[in-house]
Image (spheres, coloured by chain):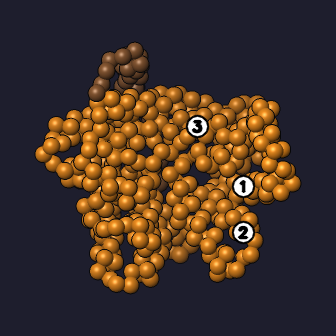
Chain colours: A orange, B brown
Amino acid sequence: MISYTSFAYYVFILLIVTLSGVFKNFFSKSKMIFVVNIIFQILFFYFNKRNFLNLSAFLLVNFILVYLVDKLKNKKQVINIFVIFNILFFIIVKYHFANTLGIFEESQKLAFVGISFVVFKFISFYLDLRNGMIKKINYLYLYNYITFFPAYLSGPLYKYQAFAEDLENENHISDQELFDNVFRFVFGAFKKVVLADLLFAFCLDNFSLESALTFSIYQKIFALYLYAIVLYLDFSGYSDMAISVAKMLGITITENFNRPYLALNIQDFWNRWHISFMNWLRDYIYYPFQMFLLKTVKVKDMNLATILSTMLIFLITGVWHGDQLNYFYYGLFHALSFAVFLIWKNILLKKLSKETRVKYFESKVFNCFSWFLTMNYFVFSLSFFINKYQVFFNVYFR
Amino acid sequence: MFILDKKNLIKIILLIIMMCIVLSLGDHHYGFQYEF
């Protein structure tokens, strides 16, 4: 399997960007991206053929489902069933609790790398189709949308309609834009491969549990701050690489980060961190769940519905990272923190006059304090996020 | 239209430096692996 930071991948990008520029007047953008996606999949899964077969089978099943949806008149109920099918497949394959059902080994035979984002994109497609946001189904576009190689493994997530419009639009980027995106790609690789990797050597994840236990409290805190920096550099570097390659091929995909460590409160932070995933959660879980609470459960307090919906998406965010208990705590910590923040925000809105609020928010001291609090809130939350389960409990909570 | 002004020149120099460092590290990468 070739990696996004391998020399082979850089050569692959160089070749396809050059060839797409040379042949832009001979082939449509969608056909060119289709061919590139196929080649990438063969190279990507070359050493893991079962992955390739599983992905192909999963795509085939979903394409048959999409074909059925396309032919049916009453789409809504059927789409709901297909969404549930995708969610169940994802849960059974990804989480170890299939073990308790005695089907873990069987479920793993269906797994493939990149399952999360493939399933998320299918869910997004089905729900947008149900809500009338997709004008026309084009199977070539859909294939390109699901398997678009720069963002295949870890996003960013984007919507089918915008992607399809970009494919239809045969305009190509200017020389200056091309240069800027080449720069962004190399800068992204630099952040991920050089800076993040260099600093990762000092993070707790990189030590054995025995040596991590001998760290002093200051070393642990330092390692935690370093982990926050590494996480940002690594993921934003990867996102820069994905977004810039997409742009070089004439596709605009959602940004993932907007200087998150400058956020002044929790809400602000989550509007700046992993933006595409938070947008996905907002559109497909937060709003529907809020509507469900208000209309079906008849919750009368809008603020309560907002708090409960927010808590749900953070719990899902935590559990999505894995089925270890520390990820659940990570989600729970953010869910509770956000709930406290929303309650506090409502109190401020009620108690303070508009002028006083403006005075507060324009005050440098207040902003510095807010920034310090937000930054440390996130860094602390990462102690739950450490990959090794034993490290989490034994190193930070002993 | 690409114009070789001061800003682009600085970017080209930075690009070459970063590219050399990234490529000199080869395929070795031991950071996070996102395989969700």
Q: Is residue A343 visible?
A: yes
**On screen, residue A183 above or below A39:** above
**SS assignment at label 2:** helix
Mark 3: which amino acid?
A: Arg
The mark nearer the N terminus, 3 or 2, is: 3
Instruction: Please identify, in this view, whether the residue under mark 1 or under mark 2 is nearer the observer.
Output: 2
- The residues tagged by marks 3 and 1 sit, at their Cα atoms, a distance apart of 20 Å
Q: Position of residue A173 (x, y in %)?
A: 29, 38
Q: Does residue A193 appear left or right of residue A309 in this picture?
A: left
The residue carrying pointer 2 sits among few (fewer than 14), some (14 to 19) or many (20 or more) residues within 10 Å by Cα, namely few
Q: Which residue corresponds to the image point at 66% horizontal and 40% vertical from the top-left?
A: A263
Cβ–Cβ below 8 Å for labels 3 and 2? Answer: no
Label 3, on which residue? A259
Question: What chain does badge 3 belong to?
Answer: A
Q: Does residue A136 appear left or right of residue A26 in this picture?
A: right
Q: Residue furthest left?
A: A26
**SS assignment at label 1:** helix
- Judging depth in this view, the residue of A383 and A176 nearest the camera is A176
Label 2, on which residue? A302
Q: Does residue A126 appear left or right of residue A178 in this picture?
A: right
Q: Position of residue A52 (x, y in %)?
A: 30, 58
Instruction: Please identify, in this view, whether the residue under mark 3 or under mark 2 is nearer the observer.
Output: 2
- Judging depth in this view, the residue of A205 and A346 nearest the camera is A346
Share a chain, discs 1 and 2? yes
Label 1, on which residue? A338
Question: What chain does badge 1 belong to?
Answer: A
Mark 2: which amino acid?
A: Met
